[in-house]
């Protein structure tokens, strides 16, 4: 999950969020559609500068504000894309946008998570090429995890489910990736107090070094200080304003680039990882 990004799915905030109603989408008071679009544009420039080819989803005025967070509706594997099933009702049309994009790009569809199963991409963490950890919480359920395990078993991939805490409630979004961001194959940024204990033990057993983000910054940002995007091993894009967490990554040998994202990420509960669906890392 930290190899160099070569191809990535994104959705413009200018089209997705232009008519978003904050109360409907559970966005905070800092949300401003025009500022969010400008901040997203800056972020996209950083992604492109890393060498990644950006594949843009539809520019239609479809009212799907959260579709800017392209990490969640699908999952990339070595064998094709898996079309996921969203736990947030307002986001249920989004996987169809991803399937259409994959077919346009010539990416094979390995399978789909079907109702009543739900799996969101933010709950999926590749520990290595043969181990997929999935957080079981308000957005991903047991039925979805079992379907994922059945899809990947023929390829020798083990799927491990871990229970997540409720944290701020059913309307808030706590994904497994809310508490861990891979920085390299053997390095990850974490907020260990909310990590499932068994997952924490697995990471340690696999020799993955854990860098603790600043707990106060995690609390003040509702977890967004930890949501960082590796464009290559130890090359990271993060939300501006969390210097202690950035310093912890830099002390671990990372180069950290930041962008202003109060109206886009902080207000809308989705960070740099959420804004991208890597299709190909190499």
Image (cartoon, rainbow, N blue to C red):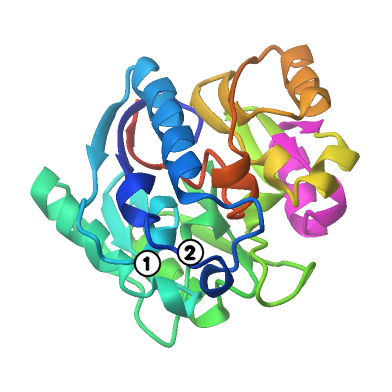
Q: CA distance from mark 2 to mark 1?
A: 6 Å
Disc assigned to residue 120: 2
Q: Is residue 19 above or below residue 275?
A: below
Assign a secondary structure to mark 1: loop
Picture quadrant where residue 218 is located: top right
Residue under the image location 47 percent in, 47 percent down = 130
Q: Is residue 201 magenta?
A: yes
Residue under the image location 65 percent in, 47 percent down = 266
Picture quadrant where residue 243 is located: top right
Res. 70 visible in picture:
no
Specify start and end residues of the magenta stretch as a single range: 189-212
Badge 2: few (under 14), some or many (20 or more) residues near its Cα, within 10 Å? many
Residue under the image location 41 percent in, 71 percent down = 91
Q: Which residue is mark 1?
A: 84
Badge 1: few (under 14), some or many (20 or more) residues near its Cα, within 10 Å? many
Q: Are marks 2 and 1 in contact (CB under 8 Å)?
A: yes
Q: Is residue 134 magenta?
A: no
Q: Is the C terminus in the top left, top right, bottom left or bottom right quadrant?
A: top left
Task: Specify whether 130 is left or right of 8.
Answer: right
Which of pointers 2 and 1 lies earlier in the amino acid sequence?
1
Picture quadrant where residue 99 is located: bottom left
Q: Is residue 227 above or below residue 134?
A: above
């Amino acid at each position: 999950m930290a190899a160099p990004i070569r191809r990535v799915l994104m959705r413009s905030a200018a089209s997705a969020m232009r008519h978003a109603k904050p109360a409907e989408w559970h966005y905070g008071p800092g949300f401003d559609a025009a500022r969010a679009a400008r901040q997203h544009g800056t972020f996209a420039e950083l992604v492109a500068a890393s060498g990644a080819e950006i594949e843009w989803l539809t520019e239609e005025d479809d009212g799907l504000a959260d579709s800017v967070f392209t990490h969640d509706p699908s999952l990339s594997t070595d064998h094709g894309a898996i079309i996921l099933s969203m736990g947030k009702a307002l986001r249920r049309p989004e996987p169809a946008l991803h399937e259409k994009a994959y077919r346009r790009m010539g990416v094979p569809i390995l399978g789909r998570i079907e109702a009543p199963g739900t799996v969101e991409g933010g709950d999926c963490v590749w520990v290595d090429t043969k181990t997929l950890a999935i957080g079981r919480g308000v957005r991903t359920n047991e039925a979805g995890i079992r379907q994922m395990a059945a899809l990947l078993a023929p390829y020798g991939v083990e799927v491990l489910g871990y229970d997540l805490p409720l944290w701020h409630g059913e309307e808030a979004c706590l994904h497994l990736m809310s508490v861990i961001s891979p920085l390299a194959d053997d390095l990850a940024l974490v907020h260990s107090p909310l990590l499932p204990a068994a997952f924490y033990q697995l990471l340690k057993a696999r020799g993955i070094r854990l860098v603790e983000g600043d707990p106060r910054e995690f609390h003040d940002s509702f977890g967004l200080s930890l949501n960082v995007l590796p464009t290559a091993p130890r090359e990271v894009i993060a939300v501006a304003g969390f210097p202690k967490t950035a310093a912890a990554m830099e002390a671990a040998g990372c180069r950290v680039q930041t962008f202003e994202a109060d109206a886009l990420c902080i207000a809308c509960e989705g960070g740099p990882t959420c804004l991208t669906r890597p299709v190909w890392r190499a």
